[in-house]
Amino acid sequence: MASRNTLNSNFGNSAVRENAFAEIENGLSALRNVTSIREILAIEGYAARTYFQVWRGLELQWKGERQNPMPPMWQVFDQRSSLLTGKNSENWKASHPINAMLNYAYAVLEAETRIRIISEGYDPRIGILHIGRKREKQDSFVFDLMEPLRPAVDGAILSFVRGQAFSARDFVLREDGVCRLNPQLARAVASAVDRRLRVQVGQPVGS
C-alpha cells in the first residue's frame, strides 16, 4: 500500500494511475493464494511495471540549455528500465537522469539498511525473498528489508525532481551512454533520501 500512497501523493487522477491502483489491489489479493516465492516475485514485478507507468511523461526542468545542451531523450521520463541493457531490460546502466537518481537513491537505502542490520546483530546474507537473485544473493536480507521503504525513496526523488531546475552539468554521460550523477548532485540526492527515511522510520531529522 505504500506504493499506492506514493502515487496518490505525487500524481493526479488519471486512467493510468487508476489502472496501477487496480493492479496493486489485484496483486495483494493474489498473494493470498501463492505457493512459492517465484509467484510472489512475479506479482511484485508486474505491479512494479504498472507503478512506473504512472511516472511516464514526468518532465525535468532545465536551465542553461544554450550553454550546456542535454540529450533530447532526457526531457521526459519514459520507462524505469534502461535502454542500454538489451533485450532483457534491467534497471542498472541508467540511460535517463531520473533513473540515475533512483539508482543512486536505492544505493543509499541499501547502504543504510545494511548498516542497520549489522548494527542490530543480524546476518545480511540470510534473507527470504531475494535469496539467489543475481547480485542480491550475497546480502538477500538487505534487499528484503529495503522493499517496504522503496516507495518512500521514490517519493523523495519525485519531490526532489519537481523542486529543482537541472543543468546538463549535473550529470555525467559516459561513453557507453550510461548516465551518472555528478558529486554535488549525488550529495543532494543522498541528503533528500536520508531526510525522507528518517521521517519514515520515526527518527528526528539531523540526529
Image (cartoon, rainbow, N blue to C red):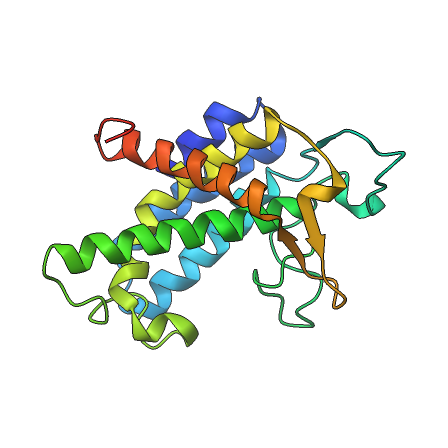
The N terminus: image quadrant: top left
Residue 28 visible in image: yes
Image quadrant of residue 117?
Answer: bottom left
Residue at the location (49% across, 55% down)?
A: 46
- The residue furthest right is 66
* Residue 150 position within the rendered picture, expressed as x and y whole percent measured from the top left: 39, 45
The C terminus: image quadrant: top left
Question: Is residue 74 depicted above or below 33 in this figure?
Answer: above
Residue at the location (75% across, 42% down)?
A: 168
Depth order, front residue of 119/90:
119
Residue at the location (39% across, 74% down)?
A: 133
How many marks are shown on the rendered structure? 0
Depth order, front residue of 136/205:
205
Question: Is residue 168 depicted above or below 7 in this figure?
Answer: below
Residue 1 visible in image: no
Depth order, front residue of 143/49:
143
- The residue furthest left is 121
Question: Is residue 146 depicted above or below 92 in this figure?
Answer: above
